[in-house]
Amino acid sequence: MRYTNLGRTGLTVSRLCVGTMNFGWQIGEEQSHAILDRAVSLGLNFVDTANMYGREDGDGLSERIIGSWLDKSGMRDAIVLATKVYAPMSDRPNDRGLSARNIIASCEASLRRLRTDWIDLFQMHHVDRKTPWEEIWQAMETLVGQGKIRYAGSSNFAGWHLARAQASADRRNFLGLVSEQCKYNLLTRQAELEVLPAAAELGIGILPYSPLHFGALSGALRKQTAGRTLLHFSERAEPHRAALERYEALCDELGREPTAVAIGWLLARPEVTAPVLGPRTPEQLDLPAAVLDDPLPDEAMRALDEIFPPVGPAPEAWAW
């Protein structure tokens, strides 16, 4: 396994992150625990979840599954644990968003479900357009002071949200954001326009989710030919058929699995800290882990840019 720092912090994380959105929704506790066991055996020390994942009537099932594994495995000190706050957790109006009340209450509820005393990375799952940053940072500072969280991060923020959030934190002499978790893959490159440049300037690590674009980049066309059609194929793969045909042909030329190429491309992006994987079996971690020791050659990176062109130039490019 290879490791890096999370953004501008001194915190060391594996170059791959175990995403747990499938825990509870797609797979049960036993299989989820097996995935976490395999992750640890491969050297992955970064686990990401959210209060809303796998929930049942507002209760975070994914967090509870991770909590039971932490109890059983005794691996809490070895894991960098990340979760999120924002999504509605009940029908009550204050059980959502980024008010100080909900940030603190959600953190305490996550701690109970995760059966831990602290959360390493507490992420805002979405920007809250109604809550001032002074209130948000006051709540985060309180949690840091109480030892309940170590760092704050964001998810699904625009570039200007990152800049505004960090400016507010700087005024308070607070560390502010250390990571941004955004949708980023070969088929979804919009983050390159503003989010990645802003994050790089501010020292914010990028944690791309959906690195395989819901499976479209995992060899969806060849799987369809073999009779294993991707879920929601008509929405997630069919609109990109021409590019995916070229992509899978390139993967064949390279002698690499499409999943490995998609993950390898992200790992080669200088702004990326760790792609967030979404395994449903322990074995689905093996191939991404192997990619770390077999980076894509430069000619493959250039070919991928031809197949999946960048959305547009960096912000300064259209100004004189």
Image: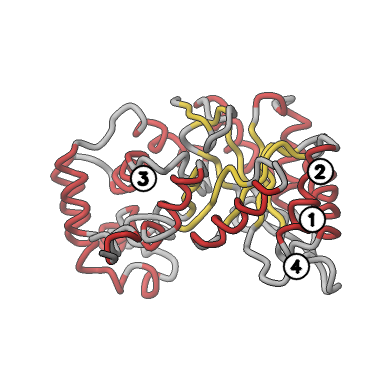
Q: Nearer the viewer, mark 1 or mark 3?
A: 1
Q: Which residue is mark 3?
A: 266
Mark 2–mark 3 CB contact (< 8 Å): no
Q: Residue drawn 83% across and 37% down?
A: 145
Helix, strand or loop at mark 2: helix
Mark 4–mark 1 CB contact (< 8 Å): no
Residue 317 at x, y percent in the picture: 27, 61
Tag 3: Cα neighbours inside 10 Å, few (<14), some, or many (≥20)? many
Q: Which residue is mark 4?
A: 88
Q: Nearer the viewer, mark 2 or mark 3?
A: 2
Q: From the image, which quarter does the C terminus lie in?
A: bottom left
What separation in Å lies between label 3 and label 4 (alpha carbons)?
A: 31 Å
Mark 4–mark 2 CB contact (< 8 Å): no
Query: Can you tell which mark lies on residue 13?
Result: none
Mark 1–mark 3 CB contact (< 8 Å): no
Residue 189 at x, y percent in the picture: 35, 60
Q: Which residue is mark 2?
A: 143
Q: Name which residue type carries label 1.
A: Ile
Mark 3–mark 4 CB contact (< 8 Å): no
Q: Name which residue type carries label 3.
A: Leu
Residue 20 at x, y percent in the picture: 60, 48
**Which callout, 4 or 1, points at the residue further toward the start of the chain?**
4
Viewer-proximal residue among 301 and 145: 145
Q: Which residue is mark 1?
A: 103
Q: From the image, which quarter does the N terminus lie in?
A: top left
Viewer-proximal residue among 170 and 223: 170
